[in-house]
Image: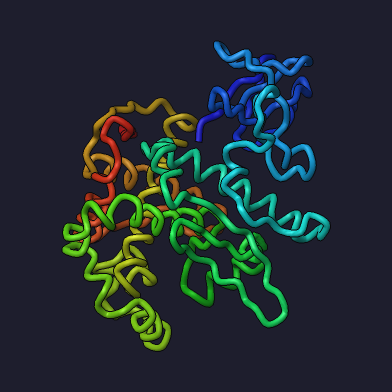
Amino acid sequence: MQTYDCSCGNKLFFNNTHCSACSRTVGWCDACAAVTSISPSGECDAPGCSQTLQPCANRAAYQVCNCLVPADGDQPLCLSCQTTTDVPDPNDPTQLTQWRVLEAGKRRLLYELAQVGVSREQLTADPPLSFRFLADTPGKHIITGHADGVITINLEEADPVVRAKGRQQFGEPHRTVIGHFRHEVGHFLWMRLVENDRPDACIKLFGDHRDPPYGEAMDRYYAEGPPADWQARFISQYASSHPWEDFAETMGFYLDMRAVLDTLEHQVTPLSVRRGADLDELLAGYLKAGIALNEINRTMGLTDLVPEVVSPPVVEKLRFVHGLFPSEAVLLATG
């Protein structure tokens, strides 16, 4: 993730709402697609923008968003908040906090999708990408998942204690809020980019999603667990459960990789960036960076960030995913 600059010269980060140096109001400007400060009169400080802005309605009312929208527009919600169709109870302090966490993760996801070349038209075509953030109620447990363009996230996934338990229970060391979003959007991207255009090529690599049926495959996975050799063929244990989950887990890994390389490019050291890189170069840069990133995490007693080895079958699956996006949007970190 890149950083931005306040009009005072201070660094601004993706989720900032105020500059820590000059106290100016800052946020994501939908008009120029950047984090920017605004003048006392509300004008965007980003070069070439000068749009008069006001806080997104969800920011003004509930502080769950950091976006700024055109003051003369007829849409009070930012582009990100418009995609959330079901929101938690803002009068419940716990749900309000969880809502804030999930909206932050969603904004990051939408930024990442734009970075890899997913167009707004692809996100809004029928059925459009939308989100529901729901809490369990007596007698009804909310299942996190995707169906027909709608991503549903159980509010409890915004609770770090619940996520920590899930990591142990399901063998998912990288169970995070952004990880959930990247996985579930993988199902959406399968529907949008694969189902009608590349089904045969996908089946060849990931398996036939029709046989066995999804429910039957998932029942077997939870009863028997992953195959003993899952690491030789899949990016994760869960990917072995069904071809749809294999695709979503592979997409999630790909988006992880792209996000890390984007951050390294902007934050760690000058890295050459080349458009149109192939998957082999992209993956080599990620695994090379992973040596340092993993050692940093180990120094702090944290889980490795990057796998040390990606098996050949998984590389071919990643190559398929890589080919779904426009080559000119692909950034390569080397050095």
Q: Is residue 269 left or right of residue 19?
A: left
User: Which residue is located at x 48 percent, y 50 percent?
Assistant: 129
Foreground residue, 308 or 40? 40
Snapshot colouring: rainbow
Q: Is residue 123 visible?
A: yes
Q: Is residue 142 left or right of residue 2?
A: right
> Is 272 on the left or on the right of 42, as rendered?
left
Q: Is residue 67 above or below residue 236?
A: above
Q: Quadrant of residue 156?
A: bottom right
- Residue at the spot x=30%, y=41% of the render? 325
| Figure quadrant of residue 77 | top right
Query: Can you give x and y, in whole percent of width and height, for residue 120 in the image?
Result: 44, 37
Image coords of residue 17 (percent x, y): 71, 33
Q: Is residue 118 above or below residue 220?
A: above
Q: Is residue 154 above or below residue 7?
A: below
Answer yes or no: is residue 252 visible.
no
Q: Quadrant of the C terminus?
A: top left
Q: Tell me where residue 275 appears, x and y as whole percent.
A: 28, 29
Q: Is residue 269 left or right of residue 137?
A: left
Q: Residue furthest bottom?
A: 223
Q: Quadrant of residue 78?
A: top right
Question: Residue at horizontal 47%, vertical 63%?
Answer: 146
Residue at figure coordinates x 62%, y 43% from the top left: 81
* Residue 36 percent location from the top left of the image: 63, 23
